[in-house]
Image (cartoon, rainbow, N blue to C red):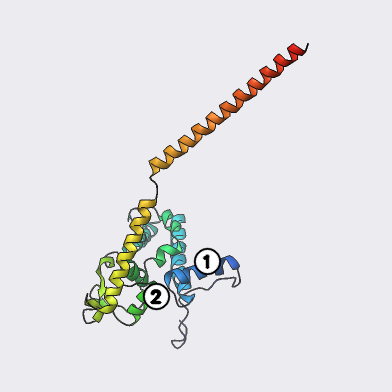
Amino acid sequence: MGSPRRPRKKYETPEHPWRKERIESEKVLVDDYGLVNKKEIYKMDSRLRSYFRQARSLISSTSLQSKKEEKQLLEKLYKYNLIQDKNTKVENVLNLKLKDVMDRRLQTLVYKNGLAKTIKQARQFIVHGHIFVNGRKVAVPSYLVLRDEENKINYDTVSGLSDPENQERAKILGFMEKKKQIAEAEIKKEPKKDETAGHKEHKKETNKERLWKNKEKKTVRKVIKKETKKEEK
């Protein structure tokens, strides 16, 4: 059991601390998800590893208990919106990535739902108690949001941010509108698949024509050489 004064760690640290590729990827995650330290990455990674361990053990066994545990695992992952179908195979659990778990954090969803301008501001609102999930205050940025709770993330009714005329709220709304406009403009700029395909076909045709022209030129040159040799004889 261990001493209650010294609770065991709920996460595993990397086996090798100085691998450059891992350090670089962790830096990207810290910036993208507005994390305070890498401990938050290790917590989510440990959770993902526990799902993998459970899935691997269930794949190899064929007992009735394993089928029961398999169903429980898939229901749990479906509840967290990590898989889209309860009846999927256990093997598909191994396709999950760390980003899939990080995207279920409350901090990420507060930012994606347009309740904050930046991912770091989303963390600030959660820690300061401005965010309610399904009618209750959640002050933990790493809280994993359930599928049913995803559309129930709002400001606290007592908080000033719940008022649309609030100065900071107006800034957030204006920022989100600009973001939408930029996204729509980028979508319009992107060429359609049919257009790009037609353009490629046109390029191919022009290349073929060039090849034929070069061949014709070569044959004409050969004929001219033959005729000049005959005249010389």
- Quick one: SS at disc 1? helix
As drawn, the label of residue 120 is 2
Q: Which residue is drawn at 27% across and 75% down?
A: 169
Q: With respect to residue 204, does 181 lie above or below? A: below
x, y percent for residue 36: 45, 78
Q: Which residue is drawn at 40% across and 65% down?
A: 101
x, y percent for residue 200: 47, 38
Q: Does residue 179 appear to the left or right of 207 in the view shown? A: left
As drawn, the label of residue 7 is none
CB of mark 1 within 8 Å of CB of mark 2? Answer: no
Lower sequence index among marks 1 and 2: 1
Mark 1–mark 2 Cα distance, whole angstroms, equals 19 Å
Q: Which of 76 and 13 is in front in this view?
A: 13
Q: Nearer the viewer, residue 72 or 68?
A: 72
Residue 99 in sight from this viewpoint: yes
Q: What residue type is labelled 1?
A: Ser
Q: On the rendered image, what quadrant is the C terminus found in?
A: top right
x, y percent for residue 118: 37, 72
| Label 1 crowd (10 A; few <14 / some 14-19 / many >=20) | few
| Label 2 crowd (10 A; few <14 / some 14-19 / many >=20) | some
For label 1, the residue is 25
x, y percent for residue 153: 27, 71
